[in-house]
Amino acid sequence: MGLKRQKQAKKTLSFYKYNFSFREPFQILFDGTFCQAALKNKIQIKEQMPKYLMGEVQLCTTSCALKELETLGKDLYGAKIILQRFQTRRCPHLKDPVPASECLLSMLGKTNPHHYFVATQDHSLTEGLKKIPGVPLLYIILNTMVLDKPCQTSLDHVRAVQLGELVCPAQQESLRSLKEEQGIAQKDGEWRGKKRKRKRSNPNPLSCLKKKKKGGPTPPKRKAEEGDGVKRKRVRHKKQRTEGGDTSAPAITNA
C-alpha cells in the first residue's frame, strides 16, 4: 500500500469525520460491480478494507443488489458468493426489487443520515452519489482500492455551514436533544413549548427606597428652646462694697 495513497485516505477520512460526524465502525454498502472487480484483481476485501480505512468496518449490501447478481447469470457467480458474506440491510424494495444503483441511492436519501460509505464501479451510480453531500466513495483502480476525494457538493455544503447558511447534521441532533430536554415538541412543522408557571420573587430592594425630595439637602433641625425659642443670657448682679470693706449686703430694717 503506497504511503501517498494512505496519507490521502487519512486526509479524506478526517474531512468526513469532522464535517459529517462519521464514526467507527464505518458502514460500507457494496454492489456487485465492486465485488467483481475485487475478484478480478485478487483483492481481499475483508482483510484490506480495515487496513486501508484505518479502523473497524461493517461490510453490508442490500437484497436488491443480490437479486441483480442472480439475474445476471453464472458470469457473476463469484461476485455473488462474496456479496452473500456481507450483512444484508433492509431496503424498501422487498416485494418489488429494483436495480442496485437505484436501491443504494434510496438507502442514502438526501443527506446520508446513516453515514454510509459506498463501494461501486458503476458510473451512473457514481454520478448520483456526487449529488448527495457527505457520501464517501470507494472504487478499484489499477489493482488497488481508492477512497475518492470529497465531491464538490460536499465541499459546498461544508462552506455553507461555516458561513452560517446551513446547520450541519451533528448540530441538528444536538439541537433536537436540547429541545427534548426542555420539553419542546414539534407539531405540524412548528416547535411548541410547554408553558411554565412563573415563580413569585421578592420585590427589587432598589424599588422600595423612599424618593428623595428635590431642592437640595434639608438643614438640620434645631432643638426647641424654652419660651420664645431665643436663648436668654444669664444676668449676674455685682455685689456692693461698704466703707468698712464689708462685702455683705446691707441689712434691711423695718421702719
Image (spheres, grey):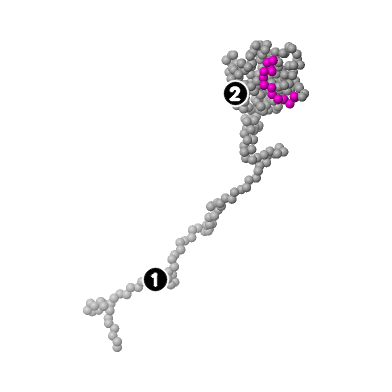
Asked which secondary structure carries label 1, the reply is: loop
The image quadrant where one finds the N terminus is: top right
Residue at x 71%, y 22% (from the top left corner): 62
Residue 71 visible in this rendered orientation of the protein: yes
As for residue 89 lying within the magenta part, the answer is yes
Span colored in magenta: 81-94
Circle on res. 8: none
Residue at x 74%, y 12% (from the top left corner): 74
Q: Pointers 2 and 1 in contact (CB under 8 A)?
A: no
Q: Amino acid at mark 1?
A: Arg
> What residue does disc 1 label?
232
The image quadrant where one finds the C terminus is: bottom left
> What residue does disc 2 label?
14
Q: CA distance from mark 2 to mark 1?
A: 101 Å
In which quadrant of the rendered view does residue 228 lie?
Answer: bottom left
Residue at x 58%, y 20% (from the top left corner): 54
Nearer to me, 28 or 16: 28
Q: Amino acid at mark 2?
A: Ser
Query: Label 2: how many residues lie within 10 Å, few (<14), some (14-19) or many (20+)?
Result: some
- The relative height of residue 69 versus residue 232 in the rendered view (above or below) is above
- The relative height of residue 93 versus residue 207 in the rendered view (above or below) is above
Q: Tell me where residue 225 appears, x and y as whole percent.
A: 43, 69
Asked which secondary structure carries label 2, the reply is: helix
Q: Tell me where residue 26 appears, x and y as whole percent.
A: 62, 23
Image-based side of 144 in relation to 65, left or right: left
